[in-house]
Amino acid sequence: MTAPRDDLGVGGVAGIGVDAVDVVRFRRVIERRPGIVHRLFTETERAYAERSRDPGPRLAVRFAAKEAVLKALGVGVGAAGFRDVEVTRAENGAPGLALSGRAAALSVGRGVRTWHVSLTHTDTIAVATVVAEGPSVRRGGAAP
Ligand SMILES: CC(C)(COP(=O)(O)OP(=O)(O)OC[C@H]1O[C@@H](n2cnc3c(N)ncnc32)[C@H](O)[C@@H]1OP(=O)(O)O)[C@@H](O)C(=O)NCCC(=O)NCCS
């Protein structure tokens, strides 16, 4: 959902977050405790990851995105459930974020209007960057 912008203002940045996950270690964790995948990821996220011969990087990068959102919200692990932050996927493959539960409440509380996310992964490292777009600010000045 993208918030409308007025003619005088541009979207302000309400928060940014970044996180990197070691794919090799993450893969080991999920091999040892397969149940954790259900606790961390939504059904849609799991289904997309499982379409890959190696779901590890896709799951690791989605975990990184969830942690990056918590950073952007200025809270720590435990402040929201991991499945409260879902990485969605547009038809062209571009990722997005859908927040629910406590994560959504925190997001509303910080005045976030829309979220942006970018993901990258190799066989060994997964990185997610997020930007929380807040209320409009007047060009070169304070919030209206
Ligand atoms: C987007 C693209 C450049 C990714 O490059 P890559 O080096 O192969 O892979 P990376 O590890 O850096 O990135 C993979 C992630 O990119 C993201 N991604 C895929 N398509 C995307 C798009 N159109 N826009 C933004 N992000 C995209 C996905 O989140 C993907 O991870 P996921 O499959 O786990 O969801 C490549 O998939 C591509 O060329 N896609 C089709 C063309 C396109 O739409 N390009 C947009 C940029 S010009």
Image (cartoon, rainbow, N blue to C red):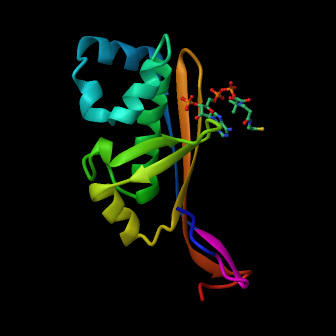
The stretch in magenta equals 5-12
Q: Residue at x 59, y 84 (%)?
A: 143
| Vertical order, 23 against 127 (above or below) | above
- Name the foreground residue: 74 vs 30: 30
Q: Percent x, y for residue 129?
A: 56, 44
79 relative to 5 in the view: left or right? left
Q: Percent x, y for residue 81?
A: 26, 46
- Name the foreground residue: 127 vs 8: 8
- Give residue 91's quadrant in the image: top right
Q: Residue at x 24, y 33 (%)?
A: 39
Figure label count: 0
- Name the foreground residue: 43 vs 141: 43
Q: Percent x, y for residue 10?
A: 68, 74
Is 8 one of the magenta-colored residues? Answer: yes
70 relative to 15 in the view: left or right? left
Is 116 one of the magenta-colored residues? Answer: no
| Vertical order, 20 against 101 (above or below) | above
Quadrant of the rendering where the C terminus is positioned: bottom right
Q: Percent x, y for residue 134?
A: 54, 70
* Ligand 1 image-quadrant field: top right
Q: Residue at x 26, y 53 (%)?
A: 79
144 relative to 38 in the view: left or right? right
Q: Residue at x 73, y 81 (%)?
A: 139
**Which residue sits furthest front?**
91
| Vertical order, 125 against 8 (above or below) | above
